[in-house]
Image (cartoon, helix red, strand yellow):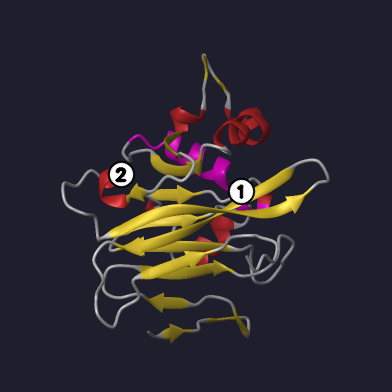
Amino acid sequence: MGWEYPLHYGTIRISKINLGVIMKLTVLGAGSAFSMIQYQSNFLLDFDGYKMLFDCGSDIRWAMHDVKLGVNDIDGIYISHLHADHIGGLEWVALNRFFNKSLPKVDLYISEYLVDDLWSDCLKGGLSTYQGAVLGLNDYFNVIVIPENGTIPLHKIVGLDHDYLGWDLTPVQTVHVMSGYKIMPSFGILLNRNKEIKDKVNTLYITADTQYSPY
C-alpha cells in the first residue's frame, strides 16, 4: 500500500491509496463544510476506469480540477446524506451532463431513505423547471435506489456479465445529527471484494459524517 502527497500551497490535501490493480481511492477534500483550503470531505473511487464520487459537495468542481478531472469524467456518484457539503455539486453535474447528449447519464447511488428528500427538499427548485417541460431526478441521473440492508454488485450497474472488478457496495447507516425528535442518518459504504486477493486490500469502509458510536 503506497501513499502519495501532492502539495497545494504547502498544504497536504490530496492522498491516494493503491488498493491493488483494480481500485484506487483519491481524497478530493478533507476539510470541514466551511474549509477554504482543504475542500469539503469528498472522495473519488476509481474502479479500473469507472469513476465514482463518494459525495458531491459544493466545491467539487474545484477539487476535481485540481486532480485534472472534470464533469465529463464522472461515471457514478454515491450520496451519503443531504448536507450541502455532500450534495451541493449535484446541480452542476446534472445540468452539465443534461446538455451533453454525447455522454450517458451519471449513475446516482442513493439510499431509499434519502431519494425523495434529495429531490423535493434539495434539487427540485433549481432543476425541475425547463423550457417546455417539468423534469424530475430521473431526467438528469440514472437513479439507483439502494433498499434497506441492500447490496449493489457493481458489475450489474455497469452492464457486464461478469463480476465487475469483484466489488460489492453496501450502505452502512449511522447517526449524523439527532435533532431531539428525529434522527438525520448518514450512509457510509462498505466495499467488499468478491474474491479475496492475497496481500491486497479486500475490504474498505468509508464512514461519511457520523457521530462517535463504539457499538
Reading the image, the residue beneath label 1 is 81
Mark 1: secondary structure: loop
Magenta span contains residue 94:
yes
The answer to which of 23 and 181 lies nearer the viewer is 181
- Whole-number angstrom distance, CA of label 2 to CA of label 1: 21 Å
Place of residue 170 in the rendered image (x, y in percent of width and height, measured from the top left): 43, 53
Q: Residue at x 57, y 61 (%)?
A: 62
Magenta span: chief secondary structure: helix
Q: 6 above or below 104?
A: below
Earlier residue among tags 2 and 1? 1
Q: Residue at x 70, y 62 (%)?
A: 211
Q: Residues within 10 Å of mark 2 (few under 14, many from 20)?
A: few
Place of residue 133 in the rendered image (x, y in percent of width and height, measured from the top left): 51, 16
Q: Residues within 10 Å of mark 1 (few under 14, many from 20)?
A: many
Q: Work out which quarter of the rendered image holds the C terminus and state it.
A: bottom right
Say whether residue 70 is left or right of residue 194.
right
Say whether residue 52 is left or right of residue 57.
left
> Which amino acid does the dot numbered 1 rest on?
His
Say whether residue 76 is left or right of residue 124.
left
Residue numbers of the magenta segment? 85-101
The answer to which of 181 and 80 lies nearer the viewer is 181
